[in-house]
Image: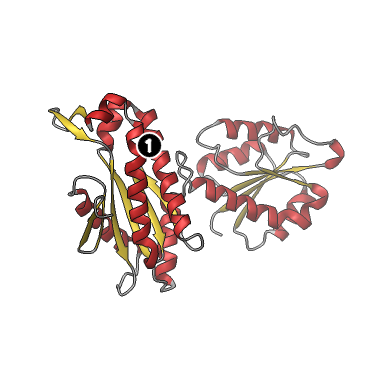
Amino acid sequence: MTGTILILSGDPAVTSVIQRELSGEGSLLVFDRVSSAYDCICNEMPLLLIADMAAEEDAKELVTFLKDDPLFSGLPVIGLFDDAKGVPEWNVLQVDDYIWKKDLKRELRTRVQLCLLRARRVVEMNPLTRLPGNISINRQIQNRLDEKQPFALAYADLDNFKPYNDTYGFSRGDDVLRITGRLLFTITKDRQNEGSFVGHIGGDDFVSIADTQVMEDICRDLILAFDRIIPTFYDPEDRDRGFIQGHNRSGRARKFPLLAISIGVVFSEGSSFSHYGEITEIAAELKAFAKEHEGSCYRINQRNYSADKA
């Protein structure tokens, strides 16, 4: 673990237990004054705040302030409570976890580790699709490369998504992204439930990681499902025409076909990839080649597959 855990308590017995139990869990900073703790948080965001709610009355105000501020709301907070004072009002007190002081020695290390894991998952999650984001994607790829594990990486994005957004608005565009993520996740897991991974890079870019034997099936299934469902996201007149009227980046009027999905696929086996950036770059190039084909398409190395052939 790298980073700082900030401890706010004026009780020496409490801080002594925390420092002893969390030895080796990262850098620990102890403050007995709320103002000093707040200054530290503003200067450098810690990994975690452990706040003694029983001993420090102002700690409750600090936690409320932090959680109401978008800049600090993601900071995980564990509250320490004295069970003799009764159960806190959880709907008012915005802590992420809690420990009764009498259980501090027994539960502290486990609660801290779980709280940090939850916080990391939230940070790495795309808020729109709820799929893992870039950090998780890069880690998944790198771990497989480091372990010399054969796998296939599919990099997908949508054709004509910007004109769709311009015509129908961001809300309906978000609906398209959500269904795309759901389709990719469901299809990938249907083909390979164990050991596969689906992530959302951002915008209309997605990735799927699976065994090489099933990746082409995933691509075919995704194209068929996407092309079948995507017309329902258009108004009837646009759906019947098979295109929407819009403007290109130069401002000229043009017709844009219905949304399609383009996929670039790379197999790691037999390659010399050692860094996630190398394999994702090749996948992006293959995806760009696939986009040259009108309609949904996937490309693996020098092979090109259209929706008709899928």
The residue under label 1 is which amino acid type? Answer: Val
Residue for point 45% across, 50% down: 185
Residue 285 position, x and y percent, is: 23, 56
**Viewer-proximal residue among 299 and 45:** 299
Residue at the extreme right of the image, as rendered: 84
Asked whether the viewer can see residue 275, the reply is yes
User: Is 123 left or right of 54, judged from the image as shown?
Assistant: left
Please identify the quarter of the rendering in which residue 242 is found.
top left
Residue for point 82% across, 42% down: 82
SS class, disc 1 = helix
**Viewer-proximal residue among 133 and 40:** 133
User: Is 278 left or right of 90, judged from the image as shown?
Assistant: left
Disc 1 target residue: 176
User: Is 27 left or right of 235, judged from the image as shown?
Assistant: right
Residue 296 position, x and y percent, is: 26, 47
Residue 29 position, x and y percent, is: 62, 51
Count every numbered label the image shows and give the total.
1
Residue for point 38% across, 67% down: 213
